Image (cartoon, rainbow, N blue to C red):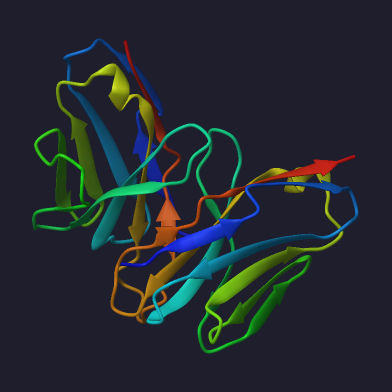
């Protein structure tokens, strides 16, 4: 089955700087890669996703890149703000598979 | 986006009792619903996948007789934790995919979660 690894597990960034979180996946059939933000005690919220037919997607301060050959994808947050502090999860899903496989999460702390 | 509700948001029960958690898709039909368990500072672990009108598919290591799942309609799935014990204390989150949206890239929408504490 699919295995998703995520790094780093914790990340502290000065406010205004950029943050990068990286994930690798094992199943070459995976074609959907969402990123979720989860605040303490709350539900995961989708912040951006990317399909396997594109290499990069951007939404304001958030961008995701995908390298299918290397089977890794990354989340980039620019101009970080205190409200970006949360736990971020990457996930992957293969074509025809209903299940999302989640990474282990990254606790991002923005230092004011 | 679509809305998924979950009830109750938190529950405290005595060891040995059963607890039922409801998950509803409010504005779409969810042909597939998922139940996750999340321990503190850990990732979401899929427990089971349920399709409306059929038996749930449980992940390896999840006891189907302990975690009963019923997906009776396109908008409701329930998870019953039977004979709960302290080690079952966790954050349980459901999610649903919109069966009415074409394509394989259907977004999953998550419920707000239920925090279960077993004394």
Q: Position of residue A46 (x, y in %)?
A: 55, 59
Above or below, comparing residue B15 to residue B50 in the picture: above
Q: Quadrant of residue A22?
A: bottom right
Q: Quadrant of residue B74?
A: bottom left
- Exactly how many numbered labels are in the figure? 0
Q: Is residue B24 left or right of residue A63?
A: left
Q: Is residue B72 left or right of residue B103?
A: left
| Residue at left offset 40%, top offset 70% | A93
| Residue at left offset 51%, top offset 60% | A5
Judging depth in this view, the residue of B15 and B13 nearest the camera is: B15
Judging depth in this view, the residue of A20 and B31 nearest the camera is: A20
Q: Is residue A106 left or right of residue B104?
A: right
Above or below, comparing residue B17 to residue A87 in the picture: above
Question: Which quarter shows the C terminus of chain B?
Answer: top left
Q: Position of residue A66 (x, y in %)?
A: 60, 79
Q: Position of residue A92 (x, y in %)?
A: 45, 68
The reply to whether residue A46 is in sight is no
Judging depth in this view, the residue of B37 and A6 nearest the camera is: A6
Q: Position of residue B87 (x, y in %)?
A: 30, 23
The reply to whether residue A77 is in sight is yes
| Residue at left offset 82%, top offset 63% | A78
């Amino acid at each position: 089955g699919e295995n998703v690894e995520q790094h780093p597990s914790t990340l502290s960034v000065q406010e205004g700087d950029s943050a990068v979180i990286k994930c690798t996946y094992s199943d070459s059939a995976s074609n959907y890669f969402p990123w979720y933000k989860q605040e303490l005690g709350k539900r995961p919220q989708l912040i951006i996703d990317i399909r396997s037919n594109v290499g990069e997607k951007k939404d304001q301060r958030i961008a995701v890149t995908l390298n299918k050959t290397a089977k890794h994808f990354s989340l980039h947050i620019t101009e970080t703000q205190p409200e970006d502090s949360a736990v971020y999860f990457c996930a992957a899903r293969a074509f025809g598979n209903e299940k999302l496989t989640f990474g282990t999460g990254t606790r991002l702390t923005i230092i004011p | 986006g679509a809305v998924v509700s979950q009830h109750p948001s938190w529950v405290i029960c005595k060891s040995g009792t059963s607890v039922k958690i409801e998950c509803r898709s409010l504005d779409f039909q969810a042909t597939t619903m998922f139940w996750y368990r999340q321990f503190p500072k850990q990732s979401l672990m899929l427990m089971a996948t349920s399709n409306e009108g059929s038996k749930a598919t449980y992940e390896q290591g999840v006891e189907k007789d302990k975690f009963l799942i019923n997906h009776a309609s396109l908008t409701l799935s329930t998870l019953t934790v039977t004979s709960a014990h302290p080690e079952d204390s966790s954050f349980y989150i459901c999610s649903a995919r919109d069966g009415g949206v074409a394509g394989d890239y259907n977004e999953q929408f998550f419920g707000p979660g239920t925090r279960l504490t077993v004394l």
